[in-house]
Amino acid sequence: MNAITKTEKPSLIAMMAAQRNMDPEQFAKTVRATVMPANHTNEQFAALMLVASKYDLDPILKEIYAFPAKGGGIVPIVSIDGWINLVNSHPQSDGFEFDFEHDDKGALVSCTCRMFRKDRSRPVAVTEYLAECVRATDPWKMKHRMLRHKAMIQAARLAFGFSGVYDDDEGAKIAEMKDVTPAAERPQPPRPPAPASASAAPAPTINHAEIVDAQTGEIIDEMEIVTETGEATDTLVDSDAFDANLFFEELEISLGAETTAEGVEERWNEFDPLATLEGDETNQSIALAIKKRRLKTIGGK
């Protein structure tokens, strides 16, 4: 009778170490020391390695690393070198290109990245605006380079569907996220029954529910909600909030639906961005850039 030989499948760490001609133990030690937070768990280390293996990113070259999340856990961060590797190694990648927009004074307004795929006839185009992305850090002193990186990363995400990985700005925001579930929606302990002798119904309890931007996690507004009925009142707790990102998105969609210069001008007048954004020259420049880009696309002036 022939003996059956059982072959053990090498571990993920062993396979990743073999690809780099390293001892598995030394490889794990190096990664833990260079791209993981000081107080991380084995499970968090394994999670980062799974993501790195899935996208074939090299943690030794800092193409991927772990950002510590508030309250524990990690967020997988991919550096710009890692994003370039993701795009260039994708079998359907067919290159990408950039366009910068400046205002009348020559100041940078936005950067558009067009990402091409071999299996599609039209590129994926993403525009990132400096006013929405700039941060008070040393890298952002090179505004054109950093904005180009942001546009490229977002275009890559849309064109190829990369999920579960973030750039450093996104990772920092996610790591700081807090629970913003409205109090009215959180599980509440049962209320004691009203005394049998009570002749009047208790006054309804009012809670303030937060309306949160799904993309940024920022609180847009608050609205009073009656706990007993679940109905919202007309009272806005914070009526001064204005979401410029949403305004630009709606403006771009509306102008994009027009195919003539006259139609674009009509929609522009309906939104009246210069009056809406009065006193905010930066956002006025962004609105003008959106209009200019649409007119250029349809052959207008």
Image (cartoon, rainbow, N blue to C red):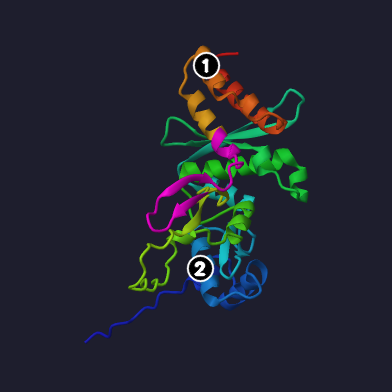
Mark 1 and mark 2 in contact? Answer it, CB < 8 Å: no
Q: Is residue 193 left or right of residue 126?
A: left
Q: Is residue 254 left or right of residue 79?
A: left
Report x, y in % for residue 204.
43, 58
Residue 47 numbered tag? 2
Report x, y in % for residue 233.
46, 47
Frontmost of labels 1 and 2 is 1
User: 115 or 208, which lies in front?
Assistant: 208
How many C-alpha atoms fall within 10 Å of the one at disc 2: few (<14), some, or many (≥20)? some
17 within the magenta span: no
Tag 1, which secondary structure? helix
Picture layout, residue 45 above or below residue 243: below
Residue found 52% across the figure and 20% down from its top: 267
Name the image quarter holding the N terminus.
bottom left
Q: Is residue 11 left or right of residue 63?
A: left
- For badge 2, the amino acid type reads Ala
227 within the magenta span: yes
Report x, y in % for residue 227.
42, 58
Residue found 61% across the figure and 26% down from its top: 273
Earlier in the chain: of badge 1 and badge 2, it is 2
The quadrant holding residue 257 is top left
Q: Specify the segment rendered in magenta.
A: 223-247
Regarding residue 58, the answer to whether it shows in the image is no
Report, in whole angstroms, how far the alpha carbon at label 1 lies from the one at label 2. 52 Å
Report x, y in % for residue 268.
56, 21
User: 257 or 272, which lies in front?
Assistant: 272
How many C-alpha atoms fall within 10 Å of the one at disc 1: few (<14), some, or many (≥20)? some
User: 195 or 155, which lies in front?
Assistant: 195
User: 278 or 227, which lies in front?
Assistant: 227
Q: Is residue 200 left or right of residue 27?
A: left
Residue 266 numbered tag? 1
